[in-house]
Amino acid sequence: MRKMMAGIAALVLSAWGMTAANAQSMSVASSEIKEGGTIANEQVFKGFGCTGNNVSPSLSWTGAPSGVKSFAVSIYDPDAPTGSGWWHWVVFNIPANVTSLPKGAGDVKSKLMPKGAIQSRTDFGADGYGGPCPPTGDKPHHYQITVFAVDVDKLPDAKDDMASAALVGFDLHFHTLAKATLTGTYGR
């Protein structure tokens, strides 16, 4: 029994180590947003009292593990005063051969997304990118830009642009091989 428990513990630690190694080898970068830096007005939402240009940042990623069949991208504000944060951008089914998105790809009318990629509903109630717009007077919020390396071509439950961030997150929970996060801040 003791040998079996030791074997299970070794297997769990080994699997955890592979996940940690994959997460450490994958990275994401943006020309517009630097790690820990303040997000520019160009990326800020236009509406709800914010006067930004609502342009999604360019993103590029490297170091995805083998076995990747697609990518997903999200921007999430854990500091939003909602009890559940705020989803600003949700993109999934990005083909595995794509390792970057150009600035402005979050505008669904721009047609800058790779073929097959789906931008789904954010907490603004629409698909596509919605930039930072925290309440006036709040401390600066943290905007977590995450790229997920996914083990399926298409997420099984999230089918179209009406998929909620929670549904996409559910699928990603079971299909993420590795992920990388870049965090920018913004307050007003």
Image: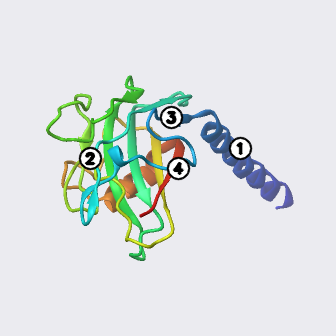
Characterize the local packing of mark 2: few (<14), some (14-19) or many (20 or more) Cα atoms within 10 angstroms.
Answer: some
Query: Hey, what amino acid is under mark 2?
Result: Asn
Give how far apart the Cα atoms at labels 4 and 2 are. Answer: 20 Å
Query: Which picture quadrant has residue 72?
Result: top left
Front residue of this view, candidates 182 and 20: 182
Element type at mark 2: loop
Of callouts 1 and 3, the N-terminal one: 1
Mark 3 sits on what residue? 29
Give how far apart the Cα atoms at labels 3 and 2 are. Answer: 21 Å
The disc, 3 or 2, on the residue closer to the chain's N-terminal end is 3
Residue 183, numbered circle: 4
- What SS does tag 3 mark? strand
Q: Nearer the viewer, mark 3 or mark 2?
A: 2
21 left or right, relative to 145: right
The amino acid marked with disc number 3 is Ala
Q: Identify the residue at horizontal 38%, vertical 34% (top origin).
A: 58
Viewer can see residue 88: yes
Residue 25 figure quarter: top right
Q: Nearer the viewer, mark 4 or mark 2?
A: 2
The residue under label 1 is 17
Tell me where residue 103 appears, x and y as whole percent. Answer: 33, 33
Check disc 1 and give the amino acid type. Answer: Gly
